[in-house]
Image (tube, grey):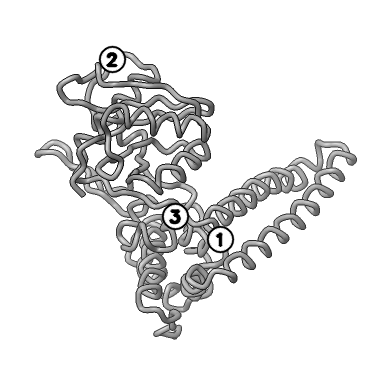
């Protein structure tokens, strides 16, 4: 797409700061502030028309801000191309900056959009099913965290806490477990009603070590294997891919994974790798062979996580469930 106009939007809960980037004007580029609602979105369209902007040749750029940008993305998606970018990516790509307010932030986003116009990939708004699935999954994750805290109270603090405190914790654990079971049932029903998501979910789950949580995460964070369709990219995104750490002749560090990653995926893949080592004869032999060679536990487990990722992407690409090729012994 040959874009002629580049819009940067700084999103907050109640307002949107919008800058139409113009190279010749730099920080004096046109700016407006609107409310973060449908009325404000319509005001934005009218303002852009006054500036002579044609939406079909315009690229909007915004930072990931969770739920506060969803309605804006829905509104824009029917009129023009847009992209969500990491705030850290934008910040580190623009060099030294001085001062900070919403107008400056919007300008920096618009400038980033212009400078990286050939690299930015327009996004598509997730389907209603994907948004609902994400909401249910996040709710489940919150309840699991609360339940884990109460389990620690019951297990570790039973000798110091009074009996009524422990009893209340046990009651909460039971209630939370019931809610988690209900949510998981809703997740399964939701997935079952969407043929494409159900297909990829079942294929991912066919890999030994990948359960409901990891399979749903694969679907969610790849937008059902459309936004990320490569195993190596997913490994990089989840903080599993190792990177070289060296410079000249003086710095010769070990290759290591980056902390710039989605830790939620990495934590759950760790659980999946442990399950695979126990239940998959091939993974069990691989783990034993590598540890016998002197490899560190963490390094071997990281390799197993990558094997799980490659297996999932291979099954989805092939369209058939994973089949064990090797037995122990």
Q: Nearer the viewer, mark 2 or mark 1?
A: 2
Give the residue number, with chain letter if any, for mark 1: 213
Q: Residue furthest left?
A: 249
Q: Which element carries disc 1, helix, strand or loop? A: helix
The residue where tag 3 is placed is 221
The Cα atoms of the two marked residues, 3 and 1, are separated by 12 Å
Mark closest to the chain's N terminus, 3 or 2: 2
Q: CA distance from mark 2 to mark 1?
A: 43 Å
Residue 204 vertical placement versus 319 (above, below): above
The residue shown at (36%, 51%) is: 237
- Point out the tag, 2 or 1, that comes first from the N-terminus: 2
- Quick check: 289 left or right of 149? left
Total number of numbered discs in the rendering: 3
The foreground one among 130 and 322 is 130
Q: What residue is rendered at 33% in x and 19% in y?
A: 104
Residue lying furthest right in this view? 164
Residue 326, position as x, y percentages in the image? 41, 84
Q: Is residue 311 above or below residue 262?
A: below
The answer to whether any part of residue 5 appears in the image is yes
The residue drawn where x is 45% and y is 83% is 328
Q: Nearer the viewer, residue 265 or 152?
A: 265
Q: Which mark identifies residue 98?
A: 2
The residue that appears at 21% across and 34% down in the rendered structure is: 114
Discs 3/1, front: 3
Q: Residues within 10 Å of mark 2 (few under 14, many from 20)?
A: few
CA neighbours of label 1 inside 10 A, class few (<14), some (14 to 19), many (20+):
some
| Disc with the residue nearer the chain's start (3 vs 1) | 1
Secondary structure at numbered mark 3: helix
Q: Disc 3 versus disc 2: distance between alpha carbons? A: 34 Å
Residue 296 in the image: state x and y as whole percent.
Answer: 37, 56
């Amino acid at each position: 797409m040959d874009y002629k106009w580049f819009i940067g939007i700084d999103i907050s809960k109640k307002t949107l700061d919008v800058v139409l980037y113009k190279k010749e004007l730099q920080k004096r580029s046109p700016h407006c502030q609107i409310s973060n609602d449908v009325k404000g979105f319509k005001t934005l369209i009218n303002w852009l028309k006054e500036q002579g902007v044609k939406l079909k040749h315009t690229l909007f750029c915004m930072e990931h801000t969770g739920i506060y940008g969803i309605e804006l993305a829905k509104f824009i998606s029917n009129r023009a191309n847009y992209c969500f970018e990491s705030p850290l990516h934008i910040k580190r790509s623009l060099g030294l900056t001085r001062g900070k307010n919403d107008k400056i932030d919007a300008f920096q986003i618009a400038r980033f959009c212009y400078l990286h116009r050939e690299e930015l990939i327009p996004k598509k708004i997730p389907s209603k099913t994907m948004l609902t699935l994400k909401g249910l999954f996040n709710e489940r994750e919150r309840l699991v965290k609360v339940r884990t805290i109460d389990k620690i109270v019951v297990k570790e603090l039973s000798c110091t806490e009074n009996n009524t405190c422990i009893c209340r914790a046990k009651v909460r654990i039971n209630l939370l477990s019931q809610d988690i079971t209900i949510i998981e049932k809703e997740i399964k029903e939701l997935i079952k009603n969407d043929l494409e998501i159900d297909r990829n979910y079942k294929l991912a789950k066919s890999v030994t070590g990948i359960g409901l949580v990891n399979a749903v995460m694969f679907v969610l964070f790849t937008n059902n294997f459309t936004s990320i369709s490569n195993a190596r990219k997913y490994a990089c995104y989840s903080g599993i891919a190792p990177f070289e750490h060296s410079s000249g002749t003086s710095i010769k560090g070990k290759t290591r994974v980056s902390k710039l990653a989605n830790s939620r995926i990495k934590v759950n893949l760790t659980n999946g790798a442990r399950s695979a080592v126990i239940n998959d004869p091939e993974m069990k032999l691989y783990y034993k062979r590598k540890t016998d060679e002197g490899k560190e536990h963490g390094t071997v487990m990281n390799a197993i996580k990558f094997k799980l990722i490659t297996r999932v992407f291979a099954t989805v690409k092939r369209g058939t469930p994973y089949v064990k090729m090797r037995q122990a012994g």
